[in-house]
Image: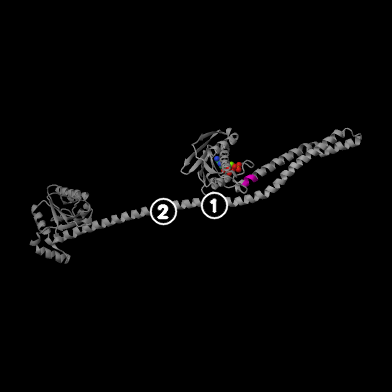
């Protein structure tokens, strides 16, 4: 880029001065060999006549000078230097003129020409407040002095301009680098977040896998004793019925006993042993034990389901919608006293799945939603839809919500906030396992005090399922 600027503005109210400057600064080339020589001497061997040529513009008042400066800027041909006469009786004096010029173009180099001490040097500097662009030329001046000032100050303008451009260039580059750096750090942040999420998922699935093995082992171990306890209780019940028969038969013949002593002894024995109570209590105890064993068996079944040890399920194309409807029917009793169920359903394509497993997930979510709703009636909303190659289902409730510090743990096996006997804490971990097995996703969003939304996404096709 050519930054050379040899435009000089002369502001002086005396016309003859303009001729003097013109002779010095724009000499006809062949007429001024002396000046060429002089310049060569002053500025080195390379100096040529051409190099000293200036474009001189004349103004005879401050206002006129300002007009030229404005025009120069508008034409993108600013002046590099202005010679300004100090004393101009008509209009602005030199100092005022310079103030105006700099307001218009702060880059302009200025030489103030004076024969008088209208201002002290200090006053002048205080008023113009710019020592680095201002020089004083005392009249009467020397030609060489003028030429030297013109050369030096136009070069200075050019160098300042070059430095400014460099600075701008540097600033742009710094901005660009900062921008790139920011972008890189944002990308890094995204990557870190993704990694954290993946790590979380990995931890979750590892936890589930090892707990699955543990659960499978426990389920297997407990299943046998549960089996014989259950069958023994059944037999015990039958045997006790037989004993009852015998006791009843004895009772029937009791009145036939003639010895009052024996009758008394028997009555005392019965009272001591509290036979009537025992007879009533034993069947109840057996029934309670059978209920207990049944519950234990159910938990073992859940554990087995959780670890999928004995599942040989069939993958099939099925309607998730049908699953949702039938599950809602099954849990209707549990839900109807607590909440209104709103269904916002779209038409879904059939998906490749294990329908019974998915039903279990839906049931868990709906029952959890109902359980989260307090004594006041709430709402459970079910929405579904298709997203690309997946279908999704959301179960929202207006229940208690989940505190942020336990949100991380709700998918953990056996994590429950429900009273003992009410929740085993397996519902969500089971659901998580089932959704993972379907290569889907389950997520949760909750606001404490206002409600929770669980969302599952399931691929329509299971390409690599074994
Ligand atoms: N919709 C919900 N609103 C509020 N809390 C919930 C909701 N769903 C689950 N939770 C919380 O997550 C915990 C774990 O849920 P999960 O279904 O695994 O077990 P549970 O419901 O406690 O017991 P289970 O399902 O085995 O009967 C719950 O105890 C409850 O604190
Ligand atoms: Mg549950």
Q: Provide residue 201's location: percent of width, then percent of height.
A: 52, 50
Q: Which residues are magenta?
A: 300-304
What label sits on residue 203 in the rendered view? 1
Residue at (65, 50) in percent of width and height: 218
Q: Earlier in the sequence, mark 2 or mark 1?
A: 2
Mark 2 residue's CB less than 8 Å from ligand 1: no
Residue 127 lies left or right of residue 278; in this view the side is left
Residue 354 lies left or right of residue 262; in this view the side is left
Q: Taking the image as drawn, is residue 142 in sight?
A: no
Mark 1 residue's CB less than 8 Å from ligand 1: no
In this rendered view, identify the residue nearer to me: 412 or 218: 218
Q: How many marks?
A: 2
Is the C-beta separation of discs 2 and 1 under 8 Å? no
Residue 373 lies left or right of residue 299; in this view the side is left
Q: CA distance from mark 2 to mark 1?
A: 26 Å
Q: Residue furthest right?
A: 259
Quadrant housing the N terminus: bottom left
Quadrant holding ligand 1?
A: top right
Residue at (51, 48) in percent of width and height: 463
In the image, residue 275 above or below residue 136? above
Q: Provide residue 88's location: percent of width, then percent of height.
A: 12, 50
Q: Nearer the viewer, mark 2 or mark 1?
A: 1
Colour convention of the picture: one colour
- Check disc 2 and report the residue beneath it: 185
In this rendered view, identify the residue nearer to me: 213 or 195: 213
């Amino acid at each position: 880029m050519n930054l050379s600027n040899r435009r000089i503005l002369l502001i002086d109210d005396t016309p003859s001065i303009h001729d003097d400057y013109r002779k010095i600064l724009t000499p006809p080339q062949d007429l001024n060999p002396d000046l060429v020589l002089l310049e060569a001497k002053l500025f080195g061997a390379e100096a040529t006549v051409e190099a000293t040529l200036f474009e001189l513009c004349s103004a005879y008042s401050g206002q006129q000078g300002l007009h030229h400066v404005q025009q120069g800027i508008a034409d993108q041909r600013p002046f590099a230097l202005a010679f300004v006469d100090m004393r101009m009786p008509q209009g602005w004096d030199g100092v005022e003129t310079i103030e105006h010029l700099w307001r218009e173009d702060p880059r302009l180099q200025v030489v103030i020409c004076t024969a008088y001490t209208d201002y002290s040097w200090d006053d002048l500097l205080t008023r113009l407040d710019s020592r680095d662009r201002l020089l004083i030329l005392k009249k009467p001046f020397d030609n060489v002095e003028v030429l030297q000032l013109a050369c030096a100050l136009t070069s200075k303008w050019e160098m300042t301009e070059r430095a400014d451009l460099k600075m701008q260039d540097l600033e742009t580059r710094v901005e660009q680098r900062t921008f790139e750096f920011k972008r890189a750090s944002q990308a890094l942040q995204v990557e870190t977040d993704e990694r954290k999420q993946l790590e979380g998922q990995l931890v979750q699935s590892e936890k589930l896998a090892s707990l699955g093995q543990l659960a499978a082992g426990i389920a297997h171990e407990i299943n046998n004793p549960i089996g014989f306890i259950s069958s023994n209780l059944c037999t015990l019940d039958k045997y006790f019925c037989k004993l009852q028969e015998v006791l009843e038969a004895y009772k029937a013949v009791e009145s036939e006993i003639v010895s009052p002593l024996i009758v008394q002894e028997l009555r005392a024995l019965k009272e001591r042993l509290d036979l009537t109570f025992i007879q009533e209590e034993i069947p109840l105890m057996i029934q309670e034990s059978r209920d207990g064993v049944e519950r234990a068996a159910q938990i073992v079944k859940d554990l087995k389901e959780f670890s999928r040890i004995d599942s040989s399920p069939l993958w099939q194309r099925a309607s998730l919608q049908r699953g949702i409807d039938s599950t809602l029917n099954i849990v209707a009793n549990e839900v109807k006293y607590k909440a209104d169920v709103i269904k916002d359903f779209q038409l879904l394509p059939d998906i490749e799945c294990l329908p019974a497993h998915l039903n279990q997930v839906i049931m868990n979510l709906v029952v959890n939603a109902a359980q989260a709703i307090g004594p006041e009636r709430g709402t459970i909303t079910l929405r579904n839809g298709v997203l690309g190659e997946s279908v999704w289902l959301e179960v929202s409730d207006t229940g208690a919500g989940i505190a942020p510090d336990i949100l991380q743990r709700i998918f953990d096996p056996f994590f429950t906030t429900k009273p003992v006997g009410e929740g085993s804490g397996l519902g969500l971990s089971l659901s998580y396992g089932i959704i993972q097995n379907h290569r889907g996703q389950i997520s949760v969003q909750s606001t404490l005090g206002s409600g929770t939304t669980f969302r599952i996404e399931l691929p329509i096709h299971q390409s690599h399922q074994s």
